[in-house]
Image (cartoon, grey):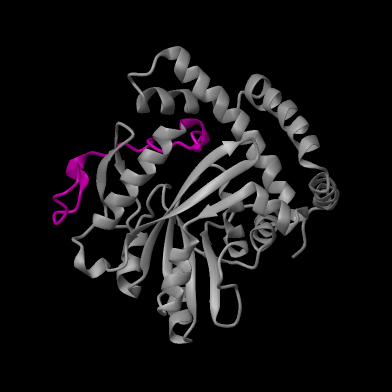
């Protein structure tokens, strides 16, 4: 692929920054916070409104504190993601801890593939380092993957895809992921695939509205559809930030038998788990998205959906 001339020096800069120690990167992050929060005021109104409407009982002072902490975390996330280009496995294991990976290995031993419900909490770009913790590794018979939405800028799209493959995982376009996972099953390969399910639903998703963070919210249902059609084990990745540059993901089982559950039960359970994660550490969720720009109501649910308001 050919890119504009200025992407070449940008690549050199990012590569050079990735070679810096974390201490230096966090100094840059502190400076970047001043630019993003105080000077550029990047989506300040969006973040303010999202937090205020999600936590109406929180004082204005507390809401401002959460917003500032979010922006500090956001610039840290950016620098930490760049570091993926030049970080050792040992350093990543010290900084990104996984708990409960025995669940993944156990189902792989049983010949089951898994779907990981995940969100924009903590540093989600570090999540592919799961391969450093599981007994099963990426290879001819086992695939570790994540679903992504292609970026409109082809240079940045290729850059992030390269970073996400750092620990041996592959990325599947969300528009084609069902086909890709079906192909893996036909080839007799086991897979574990991460689905970022806290975004806005796709146009072809079945409408499912429930109360989430004090808002009527249309939740992605496509993940549950794939889980059911491919008989996948559904896992929730519970992300928490332990300290600056240190995170923990705990794998929590949602279900290993989707067929026994009523429609949307998996989606409902995931949403409640995600809400618990956010309430525990609100500043580590991505508040800068216009998640509630398009208003929905419980009456928008499909006729078969009678479990909408949680």
- The residue positioned 68% from the left and 59% from the top of the image is 158
Total numbered badges shown on the rendered structure? 0
Q: Main secondary structure of the magenta part?
A: loop
- The residue positioned 49% from the left and 45% from the top of the image is 239
Q: Quadrant of the N terminus?
A: bottom right
Residue 146 in sight: yes
Q: Is residue 185 magenta?
A: no
Q: Quadrant of the C terminus?
A: top left
Side (left or right) of 11 relative to 50: right
- The residue positioned 58% from the left and 44% from the top of the image is 247
Give the extent of the magenta segment: 282-310
Give the image quarter of residue 63: top left
Front residue of this view, candidates 60 and 221: 60
In percent of width and height, residue 286 lies at 51, 38
Q: Is residue 296 magenta?
A: yes
Residue 176 in sight: no
In percent of width and height, residue 78 lies at 66, 41
Q: Is residue 27 shown above or below 308?
A: above
């Amino acid at each position: 692929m050919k890119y504009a001339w200025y992407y070449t020096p940008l690549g050199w800069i990012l590569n050079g920054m990735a070679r810096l120690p974390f201490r230096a990167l966090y100094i840059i992050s502190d400076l970047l916070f001043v630019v993003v929060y105080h000077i550029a005021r990047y989506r300040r109104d969006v973040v303010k409104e999202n937090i205020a409407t999600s936590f109406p009982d929180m004082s204005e002072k507390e809401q401002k504190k959460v917003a500032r902490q979010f922006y500090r975390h956001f610039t840290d996330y950016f620098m930490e993601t760049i570091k993926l280009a030049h970080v050792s496995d040992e350093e990543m294991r010290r900084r990104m801890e996984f708990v409960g990976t025995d669940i993944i290995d156990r189902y792989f031993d049983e010949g089951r593939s898994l779907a990981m419900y995940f969100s924009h909490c903590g540093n989600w770009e570090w999540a592919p380092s799961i391969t450093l913790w599981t007994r099963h590794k990426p290879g001819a018979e086992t695939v570790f993957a994540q679903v992504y939405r292609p970026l409109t800028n082809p240079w940045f799209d290729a850059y992030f895809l390269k970073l996400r493959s750092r620990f041996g995982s592959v990325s599947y376009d969300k528009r084609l992921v069902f086909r890709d996972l079906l192909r893996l099953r036909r080839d007799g390969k086991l897979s574990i695939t991460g689905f970022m399910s806290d975004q806005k639903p796709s146009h072809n998703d079945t409408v499912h509205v429930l109360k989430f963070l004090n808002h009527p919210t249309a939740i992605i249902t496509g993940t549950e559809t794939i889980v059911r059609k491919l008989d996948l084990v559904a896992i929730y990745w519970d992300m928490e930030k332990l300290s600056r540059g240190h995170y923990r993901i705990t794998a929590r089982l949602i279900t290993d038998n989707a067929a026994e559950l009523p429609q949307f039960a998996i989606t409902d359970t995931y949403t409640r788990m995600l809400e618990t994660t956010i309430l525990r550490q609100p500043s580590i969720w991505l508040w800068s998205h216009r998640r509630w720009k398009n208003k929905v109501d419980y009456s928008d649910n499909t006729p078969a959906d009678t479990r909408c308001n949680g």
